[in-house]
Amino acid sequence: MPQALLDTLKPFFARIAKAKVAKIVRGVLEALSKIEGTVERQITLCQSVVEWTKQEKRTYLRQRVESRLAALYLSKENYSQAITLINALLSEVKRLDDKLLLVEIHLLESKAHHALMNMPKAKAALTAARTAANAIYVPPASQGAIDMQSGTLHAEEKDFKTAYSYFFEAFEQFNSLDDARAMGCLKYMLLSKIMADSAEEVNGLINTKGT
């Protein structure tokens, strides 16, 4: 259905502003992402949109859809495809100096290398994401994602006290947005306390943050 809808709208897209086209396409992709069990359909749709944007030379929209596609590849554990796409995007976006998109792509890069247990590259990509983020205003959801990844990498290195502090920051960001990821951060906060030999603080956290 989403594919058929976008195909039907293509003649209409030729007559309206590119910014409106981008908003509509991204809205359709976002709506599909909220339906469980549609990852494969999302990948197929993103690939189709990318091909169309290349034909129409709509670089801005293509880069954002490719970023979403890379995230979908990660969710399916297609790491080689994800990293290949991420590297190509980084080369482009660095030249355009789109800092917010750069933050998003570096964060994906960090997650991909972490999944492959390449910690040096995962940490380097996260540092690059933070550097780009320091130069601009970063929305709370994006800042929360950065902090959550930071906590994850510190936990991998068994620095659970630092990991806890990052998970806490991520929890605060997500919780303020009523984002479901807040619950995941809380679970990681509790695990970090346990691993840092501070299990006695768990009940207090549950009582104050788990409500």
Image (cartoon, rainbow, N blue to C red):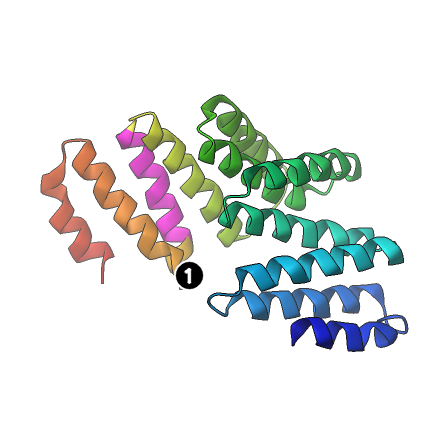
> Mostly what secondary structure, the magenta segment?
helix
- Considering depth in this image, is 2 or 153 the residue closer to the camera? 2
Asked whether the viewer can see residue 30, the reply is: yes
Q: Which residue is mark 1?
A: 179
Residue 192, image x, y percentages: 24, 37
Q: Residue at horizontal 70%, vertical 36%?
A: 90
Q: Is residue 202 above or below residue 181?
A: above
**Horizontal relation, residue 162 to residue 210: left or right:** right
Instruction: Classify mark 1: helix, strand or loop.
Output: loop
Asked whether the viewer can see residue 138, the reply is: no
**Horizontal relation, residue 174 to residue 126: left or right:** left
Q: Residue at horizontal 62%, vertical 40%?
A: 81
Residue 98, image x, y percentages: 72, 43
The local crowd at label 1, few if under 14, some if 14 to 19, many if 20 or more residues have their Cα within 10 Å, is: few
Q: Residue at horizontal 18%, vertical 54%?
A: 206
Farthest residue in the left direction? 200
The quarter of the picture where residue 208 lies is: bottom left
Amino acid on which disc 1 is placed? Asp
Residue 41 part of the magenta-drawn span:
no
Residue 169 part of the magenta-drawn span:
yes
Q: Is residue 188 above or below residue 57?
A: above
Q: Residue at horizontal 61%, vertical 46%?
A: 70
Rendered-image quadrant of the N terminus: bottom right
- Considering depth in this image, is 116 or 155 the residue closer to the camera? 116
Q: Magenta part of the protein: which range?
A: 160-173
Farthest residue in the top direction? 120
Residue 203, image x, y percentages: 12, 50
